[in-house]
Image: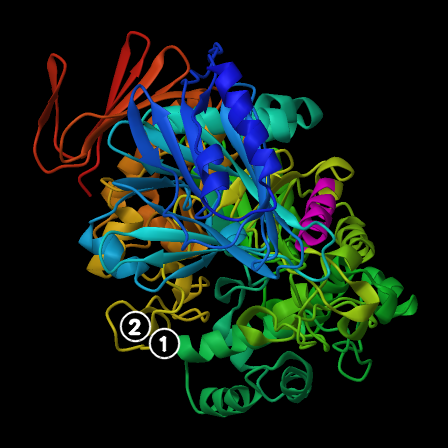
Amino acid sequence: MKKTLLTVLSIATALSLFAGSSQTLAAKAWTGQAVKSSASVAYHDFKYKVDPTTFDIVVEREGIKEHVSVPLKPRAVRDVKKTVDRIEWTYPNDKVKVIVQKKNNKYLDIRIQSIGAEQFAWPTVQADNYMLPLGEGKRIPANDKNWKQFLKEEKMTWGESFSMNFMALNKKHYSLLFIIENPFNNEVSFQTKQKIGMTFEHEFPSINPKKEYGFRLYITDNDPVAVAKQYKEYVKEHQGFKSLEDKAKDNPEIKKLFGAPHIYLWNNQALESGNIRWQKIRNKLNEPIWSWIAELAERYAGGEAEQLDSVLNEMKQQQFANNYQKRIIVDTLNQVLKLKQLYLSDYFPVLDDAAKQAVAGGVEKLSEQKLYELNKNLLKSVFQDAIDDPEEWGRDQSNVLEEMRQMGIEKAWIGLPNWSNGLMNPAFVAKANKQGYLIGPYDSYHSIQKNEDKEWNTAFFPDSTLYEQATISNKKGVKIGGFLDRGRKLNPTFSLPSVKQRVEDILQDGILYNSWFIDCDATGEVYDDYTPDHITTQEQDEAARLNRMDYIAKEKHMVIGSEGGHDFASSTIAFAHGIETPVIKWNDKDMRENKESPYYVGGYGAAQGSIPERYVKQVPVKELYQHVYLDPAYSLPLFKLVYNNSVITTHHWEWGSLKIKDEVGSRMLYELLYNVPPLYHLDSQEWDNNKELISSYLKVWSPFHAKAVTQEMTAYKVLTPDRLLQSAEYGPNLKVVVNFSNKGLKHGHETIKARSAVIYDGKKRVTFNGNM
């Protein structure tokens, strides 16, 4: 056979100048080699043949043949070259060169190179169903009506939409696993008229000297475990795999994540309503300080100056202050607390020694933390016994921390919505740290605005040159808008000096942050920058994001997390928000704009308490989104099968564990099955409303997670045809079985009750009831 094949190959080489059937005949010769298996992944023997005129690759395993891609329309071919395990050819009209080679007797290496092409689309794939790393992972049956509706005319940017770089096509007898070798400049479009299909298209940007994309094609079993473990082997080979235990050797604080819920604790207000003696404040309503506060709020803080004047006039006629009036006064005082312009000697004639020293050195030279300290003292100096001493401000949030500990919550990740929240109340940060919690600020270097906005301080940088000289332009030369189309996107390759300056400024007075959350950096939202003075590719953009996270993690010893958590960042970050529940349908107007809709998620303002509506208002989701985003029948733990003991993943902060109406119990069951930390938004009010539910759940979840997160996810099984009874295993002795259905289901010799989970930890058995 080998001698005959070599003869045919010689003919192919000799006829390479001729397009047509002789080349195709030669290229279609079957090739295959014996396959060895490794301890961790079983490699399956397969043969393949290629038709260059249509880019049709057919693989054969155990006598079963499958097309790798939908064949292209026949096209001119030249320069065909073939050896025993390799074939290459050129499409002169498409201006691309293709190389297909079987490597290591394990996979096909498929490479597509531009020789002048601006883009090329291959493969177009069809399968019975797909296993795709959309977030944690999704199973998409090709004939499913829900996915057809959701994916109709959908086009996804690969790096943003897919958490890992593979796609698996389940055929009848085996799966075709495509591992994407170049994750940049790719889009996937879906076809849904008949069965769901996908087309993968790559752009070859003019600014990028790398003119190649390609795939490794493996044959695996139709099983998410087989697919994920094969990909994990690739990760180990290609970029290395770093476990949480490995990361904890560099920073032992990472172990505080083991068994820790993730909690955004909203303490926006340094001064709270409870810190004010409202009857006494009425006696000071005619003092000149109020006109100064109103002027500052209007001029610098975008405050509610008009409402403040009205509120003050109303209160002068009343014997009390209503809740609305209290809110306006508290909000305005907290706004002016942030201003360097607050101190004016005419309004603050009596200063204590600390304030005198701060003022003498120049208010403009104070650090942010010292500024807040001064301004607290200034307000106390004029309002005297009408407000508490500054040491007492923010006590409601401190009370939440104390109660959490009293109710048995020994570990927690506490996220502050802004670094200023901690600088205004450093004692609160110290208290969380002392209790053994991780605590850190939200930070972002994604958007940049030209002018400073106190309500969006992450988008302002002291380096005034960045806005004009370091922002991203598209290929038409147009600047790309920032978040919500405000400002611009900052080119991350210029960001590190500003990152260092910001972090140093925040930490300079010893604030006890031990964690840091960086928005967007691990989402895969990266850009080609066509600005002539600083051409930057997507690959360079991504590397710069990793570099700045690495700086904060290593040089500042912070436990780093980011939005998204896509696997290019897996060696750098310890946790991620958004893999498990991503942002649900960002462009749905009923959810985002129509305030009369029952699905409206809420705005960025706080209707009551201190938490913006968007994060705390409980809403249902549309039936289609319930299926696509939440239905366990479609979920697969693909990310966990690869990264369970490397990156801790949870929900996006817009879709915390309590956000979705009628889904709270189901999401708890999901969090147990997939070893996912619950994510909560809390202030004193929300804590009082939910503390019993949270603490009782964590009594089961926390010890399970603390053990499971140190193990590899070793198995995942669907145990019933409706896919509502599922099991997962972590390491050799830890297993969880979850029944998502509304009826008891048999598992082995026992019945798993409706909407419940059973954890088997060696000989120990723990149950959880998810009926909420």
Does residue 385 sit above or below 621 in this rendering? below
Name the kind of residue labelled 2 in the image: Asp
Q: Nearer the viewer, residue 626 or 305?
A: 626
Q: State the image coordinates of residue 336 (x, y, percent, origin top left).
A: 66, 75
Does residue 736 sit above or below 356 in this rendering? above
Q: Which mark is residue 515?
A: none
Q: State the image coordinates of residue 469 (x, y, percent, origin top left).
A: 81, 71
Q: Is residue 313 left or right of residue 702?
A: right
Quarter residue 622 falls in: bottom left
Name the kind of residue labelled 1 in the image: Glu
Q: Nearer the viewer, residue 177 or 160?
A: 177
Residue at numbered disc 1: 593
Q: Nearer the viewer, residue 606 or 387?
A: 606
Does residue 306 sit above or below 71 in this rendering? below
Residue segment shown in magenta: 538-550
Q: State the image coordinates of residue 132 (x, y, percent, origin top left).
A: 38, 42
Residue at numbered disc 2: 590
Q: Is residue 589 left or right of residue 238?
A: left
Residue drawn 25% across and 47% down? 142
Q: Is residue 494 left or right of residue 128?
A: right
Tell me how far mark 1 sits from mark 2, CA to CA: 6 Å
Q: Is residue 166 visible?
A: no
